[in-house]
Image (cartoon, helix red, strand yellow):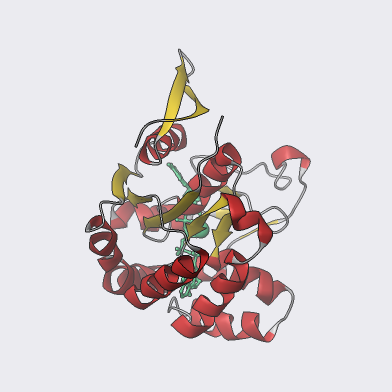
């Protein structure tokens, strides 16, 4: 039986598949998926001052200031569902945020357990972002590889409207990649020095990336041939 605590940070460029994989992993491990981008978009939907502030940065593909983001994550990590662990998607995004996360975890008496890094070429990132559709209700994402039904989301009986994220416009996409390279990519080395990083090719199909993700967080995996459908047995290895 699983009794292990998981503190997972997902690294990867915009469009590398962090959100897609975080949803799957969170469901397998039964721990929350915390996406700072989703938290900002949720605040914007509710018209909060935090959401309006975040929008002014997101629309340009720039990062929301560290102090704002760290404060929001700190509150979220203090919520009871994080007692069993968490998957952070889109945070930290700067060395300063990573150091702030260390401090928060130290206060909680915890430490990160793994940092899967999804590597995808810039050309493919741009292609994916250009064809992404997102559900307004459940947040499911689609693209030309996993095309959305014409009439709306339809994922698990959801009938939400699909929309294109404003920051998926071409100029903003390019700036997000530039910002990622400059401010976020240094985190790969930051966490690699602690032996936490496992690099995964995010260019494989979703199911193969999922298998690699399970290995990266040290879950034992059973593969059902010939469907290659991954099941994690939730048995820990000795690492
Ligand atoms: P955020 O929402 O975090 O965006 P992002 O990092 O740019 O990443 P995306 O959500 O665009 O992509 P993803 O990696 O989740 O890929 P997805 O699974 O959707 O941040 C947005 C903004 O918020 C930032 O620019 C910033 O302004 C602000 N912000 C957020 N966090 C912040 C922080 N910590 N500090 C400061 N500011 C912050 O997949 C993409 C597409 O590809 C989808 O269509 C999907 O269906 C498809 N796809 C996924 N995997 C595959 C696959 N294996 N094969 C084929 N298609 C695939
Ligand atoms: Mg995302």
Query: Residue 108 or 113: which is nearer the viewer?
Result: 108
Counting from the top left corner in percent of width and height, residue 85 is at: 54, 52
| Position of 188 relative to 203 (above/below) | below
Q: Judge whether residue 22 can be spotted in this image.
A: yes
| Position of 147 relative to 91 (above/below) | above
Residue depicted at x 63% and y 83%: 50
Left or right of 52? Residue 73 is left
Counting from the top left corner in percent of width and height, residue 196 is at: 31, 51
Query: Residue 214 or 161: which is nearer the viewer?
Result: 214
Residue depicted at x 74% and y 75%: 46
Quadrant where the N terminus is found in the figure: top right
Q: Judge whether residue 65 can be spotted in this image.
A: no
Residue depicted at x 36% and y 73%: 99
Query: Residue 150 or 124: which is nearer the viewer?
Result: 124
Quadrant where the C terminus is found in the figure: top left
Counting from the top left corner in percent of width and height, residue 17 is at: 45, 50
Residue depicted at x 55% and y 71%: 73
How many dots with numbers?
0
Counting from the top left corner in percent of width and height, residue 6 is at: 48, 48
Left or right of 120? Residue 108 is right
Left or right of 169? Residue 201 is left
Answer with the quarter of the image where residue 13 lies: bottom left
Answer with the quarter of the image where residue 123 lies: bottom left
């Amino acid at each position: 039986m699983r009794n292990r605590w998981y503190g997972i940070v997902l690294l990867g460029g915009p469009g590398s598949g962090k959100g897609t994989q975080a949803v799957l992993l969170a469901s397998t491990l039964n721990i929350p998926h915390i996406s700072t981008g989703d938290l900002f978009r949720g605040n914007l939907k509710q018209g909060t001052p935090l959401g309006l502030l975040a929008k002014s940065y997101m629309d340009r593909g720039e990062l929301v200031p560290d102090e704002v983001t760290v404060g929001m994550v700190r509150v979220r990590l203090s919520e009871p569902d994080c007692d069993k662990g968490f998957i952070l998607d889109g945070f930290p995004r700067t060395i300063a945020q990573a150091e702030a996360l260390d401090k928060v975890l130290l206060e909680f008496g915890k430490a990160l357990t793994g940092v899967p890094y999804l590597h995808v070429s810039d050309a493919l990132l741009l292609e994916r972002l250009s064809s992404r559709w997102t559900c307004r209700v459940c947040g499911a994402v689609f693209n030309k590889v996993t095309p959305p039904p014409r009439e709306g989301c339809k994922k698990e009986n959801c009938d939400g409207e699909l929309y294109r994220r404003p920051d998926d416009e071409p100029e903003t996409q390019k700036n997000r990649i530039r910002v990622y390279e400059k401010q976020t990519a240094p985190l790969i080395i930051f966490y690699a020095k602690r032996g936490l990083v496992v690099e995964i090719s995010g260019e494989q199909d979703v199911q193969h990336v999922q298998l690699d993700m399970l290995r990266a967080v040290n879950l034992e995996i059973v593969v059902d041939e010939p469907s290659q459908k991954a099941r994690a047995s939730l048995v820990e290895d000795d690492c």
